Amino acid sequence: MERLLENGRMRLTFCLSLLLVSLSVQAKTPEPAPAAPTMNEIAGRVQSVDLGESVLRVSTESGYRVTFSFNRETKLTGLGLPKSVEDLKYEELVTVRYQGKELLALEIEKRSLASVP
């Protein structure tokens, strides 16, 4: 009888050891980091800003006209400390960092100030 009890304790100890090892291995396995969004960028001059439609139109040096959408999360940086897209003026040089085919502007860097007429 004692031998059965001892055998049962050994099995229980063995099972608990396996469980602890299994939990230890699971705890040490790191989660893969989420992929950072890939950003593209285009430099050009501001042609227009439509606040109602949340659209910024930029013309590139090579003559392409590109229309970007923007939202509240769009970050503005650069000269003159722009606080909103509304601060961008016609012909100012900007670099737009965007994501995806939808051309959503994630960051707009103002690289020149508008010339005063």
Image (spheres, rainbow, N blue to C red):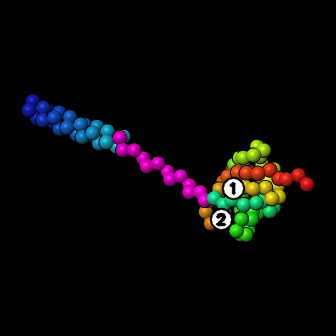
The secondary structure that most of the magenta stretch takes on is: loop
- For the residue pair 34 and 117, the one nearer the viewer reads as 117
What's the amino acid at mark 1?
Answer: Thr
Whether residue 12 is visible: no
Residue 80 percent coordinates (x, y): 78, 44
**SS type, badge 1:** strand
Q: Earlier in the sequence, mark 2 or mark 1?
A: 1
Q: Label 2: which residue?
A: 102
Residue 96 percent coordinates (x, y): 68, 57
Q: What residue appears at the point 23 percent right and 37 percent down from the top-left corner? A: 17
**SS type, badge 2:** loop
Instruction: Confirm whether the magenta stretch covers residue 114.
Output: no
Q: Which residues are magenta?
A: 28-40
Q: Label 1: which residue?
A: 95
Label 2 close to label 1 by CB (< 8 Å): no
Residue 107 percent coordinates (x, y): 67, 52
Residue 65 percent coordinates (x, y): 73, 68
Q: Which mark is residue 65?
A: none
Whether residue 109 is visible: yes
**Image side of residue 3 versus residue 114, left or right:** left
Mark 2 to mark 1 CA distance (whole Å) = 17 Å
Quarter of image, res 45: bottom right
- Among all residues in the image, which is located at the extreme top? 2
Label 2 crowd bin: few (<14), some (14–19), many (20+), radius 10 Å:
few
